Image (spheres, helix red, strand yellow):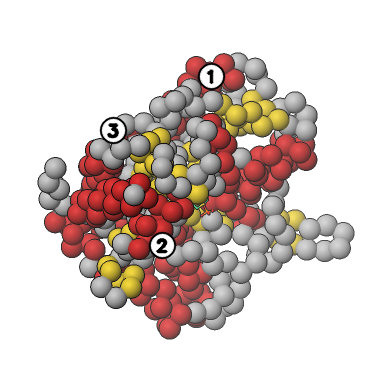
């Protein structure tokens, strides 16, 4: 099969990412297929952060001096940019945190401790990342609530009948669901699932870590009460992520962390707290990273989220077709039309770590292991898989290199 032509705009976009021109070792160019772990950064994001440090570095929300006011304007401008990108109703609904993991922990601890009681249920699916399981287990241990896993089907979809049955208990207070699975690639029908949860009186936390970087997303259309994501998976920097929460829910939540910036008044008799989102942003925040996130959003908008989604769908279909020709290779998850641009697979004859090393020798970066989704791997009777995850700058030729090298590695181990 010959590779389809890659969209010219996306070929041009490759030049925006300096690291993509770097050899892994002399003469071995990088084929970066570990985008679900973290994405590469365009020069514009790095320049925005450098510019911040070179020209306006100061702490935010504190000083009355000019630079502090400029830094505050940049930081709050980033918040508005996130609001618009995810179609939130207000920038009060955007809380800056360290990453998706911290966003989910914030809800589990601030909302969960205040609202859960013994016997209450939190639904998660079997395909969740540990970040959308463990925080709920921690708060369940604290409150006496119960974490209930909803089964997935062999094809890697959340079993919708099981989900509907679980909601019938009348005890479900929150459903925590990945919009896109980081292992199966499945795009879950979150809007429909949120409607069902709301009808049953439950809230919905959407783990959007693997969807926001790859497709247009509207938190209001999805019906998300809360949503979590990380900048580093959407061409932005590490160290900053976002919790989206409906204003009324955030307003009613007690703080998670205490310290500077999150208070209104402090005395030894009584401390009162700031309005949201400041209430949840104790201490000096990641200011340069917020500037970087704003530049990342500008970059993604410039390319076009729909363009990215269409490109990745074509790429994953092409890659999966190629992988399906390799003897003894098992892919898990739904068909390409129902998934984002990633695929996890295992060979019956080669350990995933050996396969990943074989790929690395050819300059191809993939992830091998359980991808922080152990219950999912247990569900499929697999200890580990290799995962190839694509992004806007990957090409069909790179998908060819992946398939050829997996086959070569398989043949090598079969000798
Ligand atoms: N998944 C992966 O290789 P953090 O680490 O907080 O930025 O993101 C956590 C997270 C939450 N939900 C989903 C669905 C995720 O995929 C991730 C991160 C990476 O799959 C690193 S483990």
Q: Is residue 54 left or right of residue 281?
A: left
* SS state under label 1: helix
Q: Position of residue 88 (x, y in %)?
A: 44, 45
Chain-order first, disc 2 or disc 3 = 2
Image point 71% across, 43% down: which residue?
138
The residue beneath circle 2 is 236
Q: Position of residue 148 (x, y in %)?
A: 64, 28
**Position of the N terminus by quadrant:** top left
Where is 367 relative to 88, above or below? below
| Mark 3 crowdedness (10 Å alpha carbons): few <14, some 14-19, many ≥20 | few
Image point 51% across, 61% down: which residue?
240
Image point 72% across, 41% down: which residue?
139
Q: What mark, if any, has residue 337 been given in the picture?
A: 3
Q: What mark, if any, has residue 291 been given in the picture?
A: none
| Mark 1 crowdedness (10 Å alpha carbons): few <14, some 14-19, many ≥20 | some
Task: State the image quarter where residue 30 is shown.
Answer: bottom left
Chain-order first, disc 3 or disc 1 = 1
Q: Position of residue 406 (x, y in %)?
A: 31, 49
- Indicate yes or no: mark 2 CB to ligand 1 under 8 Å: no
Q: Position of residue 297 (x, y in %)?
A: 36, 58
Looking at the rendered image, the disc whose residue lies closer to the viewer, 1 or 2, is 1
The residue beneath circle 1 is 162
Q: 390 or 146: which is nearer to us? A: 390
């Amino acid at each position: 099969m010959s590779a389809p032509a890659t969209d010219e705009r996306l070929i041009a976009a490759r030049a925006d990412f300096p690291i993509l021109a770097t050899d892994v070792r002399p003469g071995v160019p990088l084929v970066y297929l570990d985008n679900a772990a973290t994405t590469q950064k365009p020069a514009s994001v790095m320049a925005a952060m450098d510019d911040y440090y070179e020209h306006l570095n100061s702490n935010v929300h504190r000083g009355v001096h000019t630079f502090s006011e400029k830094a505050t304007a940049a930081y709050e401008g980033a918040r508005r940019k996130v609001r618009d990108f995810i179609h939130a109703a207000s920038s009060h609904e955007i809380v800056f945190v360290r990453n998706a993991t911290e966003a989910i922990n914030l809800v589990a601890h601030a909302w969960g401790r205040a609202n859960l009681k013994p016997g209450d249920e939190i639904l998660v699916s079997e395909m969740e990342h540990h970040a959308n399981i463990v925080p709920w287990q921690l708060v369940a241990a604290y409150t006496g609530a119960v974490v209930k896993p909803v089964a997935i089907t062999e094809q890697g979809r959340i079993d919708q009948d099981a989900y509907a049955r679980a909601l019938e208990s009348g005890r479900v207070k929150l459903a925590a669901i990945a919009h896109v699975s980081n292992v199966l690639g499945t795009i879950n029908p979150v809007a429909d699932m949120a409607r069902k949860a709301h009808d049953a009186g439950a809230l919905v936390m959407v783990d959007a870590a693997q969807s926001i970087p790859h497709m247009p997303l509207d938190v209001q259309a999805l019906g998300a009460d809360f949503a979590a994501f990380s900048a580093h998976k959407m061409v932005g920097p590490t160290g900053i992520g976002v919790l989206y929460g409906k204003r009324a829910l955030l307003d009613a939540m007690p703080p998670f962390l205490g310290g500077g910036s999150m208070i209104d008044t402090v005395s030894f008799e009584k401390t009162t707290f700031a309005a949201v989102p400041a209430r949840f942003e104790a201490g000096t925040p990641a200011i340069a990273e917020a500037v970087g996130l704003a530049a990342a959003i500008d970059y993604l908008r410039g390319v076009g989220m729909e363009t990215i989604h269409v490109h990745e769908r074509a790429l994953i279909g092409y890659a999966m077709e190629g992988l399906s020709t390799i003897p003894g290779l098992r892919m898990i998850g739904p068909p390409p039309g129902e998934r984002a641009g990633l695929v996890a697979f295992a060979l019956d004859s080669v350990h995933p770590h050996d396969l990943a090393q074989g790929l690395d020798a050819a300059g191809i970066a993939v992830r091998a292991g359980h991808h922080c989704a152990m219950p999912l791997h247990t569900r499929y009777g697999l200890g580990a898989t290799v995962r190839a995850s694509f992004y806007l700058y990957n090409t069909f030729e790179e998908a060819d290199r992946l398939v050829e090298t997996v086959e070569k590695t398989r043949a090598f181990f079969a000798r």
